[in-house]
Amino acid sequence: MSEVTPKWISLLGLAARARQLTTGEELVIKEVRRRSLYLVLLSDDAAELTKKKILDKCSHYSIPVRILSDRSTLGQAIGKAERVVIGVKDAGFAKKMTALIDQ
């Protein structure tokens, strides 16, 4: 991670404290099927099969996905061990996070 923490990482930590995140491949896929996620964050170092599964499922249910960083950065941002995939359950967090990531 660089000296200056990107704003989306801080926002991800805030969303975690607000309990507006789902982590883990199977749980995220379950939430995607329920259409209860507004954004999915996928680590760049995820296994190809995992990437394909998540991207296909999110594409089918029209849920935006952002591929970024690595699993340890995503895990650190939410105060957990390494995380490959994180789903954002709140529309406000998702909208702001997407804007910060896309800058």
Image (cartoon, helix red, strand yellow):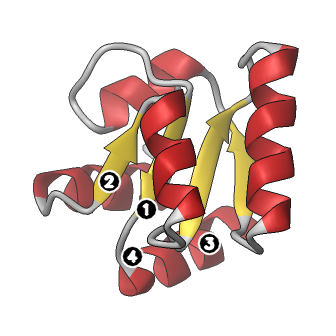
**Residue 98: numbered disc:** 3
Mark 4 is on which residue type? Phe
**Cβ atoms at labels 4 and 1 below 8 Å apart:** yes
Q: Secondary structure at mark 1?
A: strand
**Residue 102 image position (x, y, % from top left):** 74, 69
Q: Is residue 37 above or below residue 56?
A: below
> Marks 3/1: CA distance?
11 Å
Q: Is residue 10 above or below residue 90?
A: above
Q: Which residue is mark 2?
A: 21
Q: Which residue is mark 1?
A: 88
Q: Answer few, some or many: residues within 10 Å of disc 1's Cα (few below 14, many 20 plus, some between 14 and 19).
A: many
Sequence-wise, which precedes: disc 4 or disc 2?
Answer: 2
Residue 41 appears in view:
yes
**Residue 93: numbered disc:** 4
> Marks 4/1: CA distance?
7 Å
Mark 2 is on which residue type? Leu
Q: Nearer the viewer, residue 75 or 10?
A: 75
